[in-house]
Image (spheres, rainbow, N blue to C red):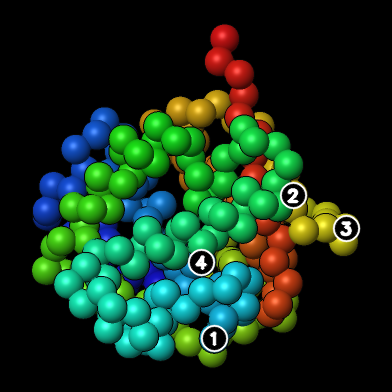
Amino acid sequence: MKELKNSILNIAKSTGANKSKVPTEVLSELLYYRLVIARLGEEDNNAWWESNVLSEVGRRNVNRFLPNTFAKQRYDMARKIIYTKETRSIDNRKFLSIYNFSYKFESEVFKPFVDEMAISEEWPTILSILENIKSVKFSSPWVREYFDMDKLPSVNLKDTTTVEVGSIHENFYNEYSEFITVIKGLLSIYDCCTFGKLIIPYYTRKVAI
């Protein structure tokens, strides 16, 4: 997975995909986690959401209808499926999750970034790597080993389907150190997700003063 993470960052830098003031390392790493977790949650892996968009089966089935645009749309389609599940599960409308950093961020920063990445010559290679993540099913904590992380926040979960990790300011992503702290908080909950059992982590958005 480290190779995939580095590849996404290299493509972002070589193509100049980031036109915003947000650090390229933040956008690249966020795309990495979003893509991999989306793929791990598909039906041929851990069945966290009804999706096969990033799988080989999904490519073969949908590509027949969208042969010219499917490669470019795959991330957007996968995110929409997950974000819809999040909004249906989380009562608080002002939430920030791994797939939702606020409307402004998603529309003005991240979507333009992904659009630029998706027209690069290297994008099909990224999708191919994701397709090859298959038959991966978790039965115990997995994030630290899978993402090569030495430490995660400790959590004590009861029988729940959503978890409020904490509260954060909307522009936390402007600093890499704050971004990675938030990501680790979210991943500490995904670490407890197993085959067929999804727990959705989220932060509430602090009111700007």
Mark 1 and mark 2 in contact (Cβ < 8 Å)?
no
Closer to the camera: disc 4 or disc 1?
A: 1
Pick whichever of labels 1 and 3 is earlier in the sequence.
1
As drawn, is 192 to the left or to the right of 43?
A: right
Query: Residues under labels 4 and 1: Cα distance?
Result: 13 Å
Label 2 packing within 10 angstroms: few (<14), some (14-19), many (20+): some
Q: Nearer the viewer, mark 1 or mark 3?
A: 1
CA–CA distance in space, label 3 to label 2? 10 Å
Residue 181 in the image: above or below residue 126: above
Q: Residue furthest front?
A: 65
Give whichever of 79, 124 is nearer the camera: 79
Visible residue check, residue 177: no
Amino acid type of the residue tagged 3 in the rendering: Lys
Please give the residue where the numbered disc 2 appears in the rendered image: 163
Where residue 149 sits in the image (x, y, percent)? 53, 62
Determine whether label 1 and label 3 are within 8 Å by CB.
no
Tell me the tag on residue 44.
Answer: 1
How many angstroms separate mark 3 from mark 4 (CA)?
22 Å
Distance of mark 1 from mark 3, alpha carbons?
27 Å
Q: Earlier in the sequence, mark 4 or mark 1?
A: 4
- Tell me the number on the disc at residue 165: none
Q: CB atoms at circles 3 and 2 under 8 Å apart?
A: no
Q: Earlier in the sequence, mark 3 or mark 2?
A: 3
Q: Nearer the viewer, mark 2 or mark 1?
A: 1
Give the amino acid at mark 2: Val
**Residue 181 left/right relative to 189:** left
Q: Which residue is mark 4?
A: 37
Q: Hey, which quadrant is residue 118 in on the image? A: bottom left
Task: State the residue position of label 3.
Answer: 158
Most distant residue in the right direction? 158
Q: Earlier in the sequence, mark 2 or mark 1?
A: 1
Q: Quadrant of residue 173?
A: top left
